[in-house]
Amino acid sequence: MTQAYVLTLSCPDRLGLVHAVSGFLLEHGGNIEEAAQYNDPATGLFFMRVQFGCDQHDQTALSEHLSAFAQTHQMGWSLHAKAQPMPTVILVSREGHCLNDLLFRCKSGLLPVDIRAIISNHRDFYQLAASYNIPFHHIPVTAATKAQAEAKQYEIIQAEGAELVVLARYMQVLSNDLCTKLAGRAINIHHSFLPSFKGAKPYYQAHDRGVKLIGATAHYVTADLDEGPIIEQDVTRADHTDTVEALTARGRDTESQVLARAVKWHSEHRVLLNGHKTVIFR
């Protein structure tokens, strides 16, 4: 039976890499169904994503062959079964538009994720979680209990085998330690078009400045607040007649769409880190 896989890799660029990868897959019975690559002249790095079918090896055996092949090319790589939804944990506070959107898209088969738990510092969405039959963990956070709260959060993330953590308007700043533990697998939605209007109440700041565009930014979480590699951004038009409430409502729609696209691309293994930036194979 043919199994579909997704292989992503990066390495120093040199001649013949596409030929080498396709030759390796041919040698091991792989039939390429989709492929994309990018050479970054600024860093001298090569990035590639290949979706292929293979019926000669299981994933463990194929990974062993890949490991030996990658060593000869100084490659960082990952191999995933395409049909396997990505185990995911969602963190949320008191604004539920992004959470509700992700849950609906997942239930509708529009996102290849397996949402295994929802963690919140408030109780607002326990009924919403129950309606989707997803465990809800209420973990209050104060300045005095932050370390203990994060330890509980990380324990749940690990216990659920989460490969992705989504901050769906989770309004707590993660510690440097937790950011490090979740490096490359935690996505945040920022309620403005970074880098403008950082911090609290961005729509009030935008309204005060009379902006003509408002937006949202999905990025990986790092210890530098709102400075992580950007995955996706979008904007919507605004004008002088818009109230703060109108801007906020329109912004929430944009946030939901931007976060959903970022989660989809990440869970389909279409996002590769390139230093402080990302390569997106859409």
Image (tube, rainbow, N blue to C red):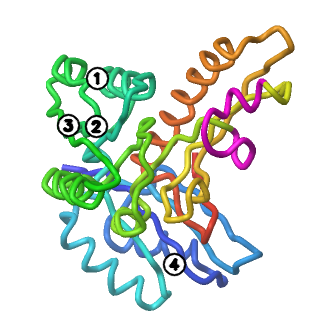
Residue 51 located left or right of residue 42? left
Q: Which class describes the residues within 10 Å of circle 1: few (<14), some (14-19), or many (20+)?
A: some
Q: Secondary structure at mark 2?
A: strand
Mark 3: amino acid: His
Inter-mark Cα distance, 3 to 1: 9 Å
Q: Which class describes the residues within 10 Å of circle 4: few (<14), some (14-19), or many (20+)?
A: few
Q: Which class describes the residues within 10 Å of circle 3: few (<14), some (14-19), or many (20+)?
A: some
Q: Secondary structure at mark 3?
A: strand
Residue identified by numbered label 3: 138
Judging depth in this view, the residue of 118 and 138 nearest the camera is 138
Which mark is on residue 51? none
Residue identified by numbered label 1: 124
Inter-mark Cα distance, 1 to 4: 53 Å
Mark 3 or mark 2, which has the lower sequence index? 2
Identify the residue at horizontal 34%, vertical 49% (top origin). Answer: 165
- Residue 183 drawn at (x, y percent): 41, 65
Mark 2: amino acid: Ser
Judging depth in this view, the residue of 80 and 218 nearest the camera is 218
Q: Is residue 258 above or below residue 33?
A: above
Q: Confirm or deny contact between disc 1 and disc 2 (CB under 8 A).
A: yes
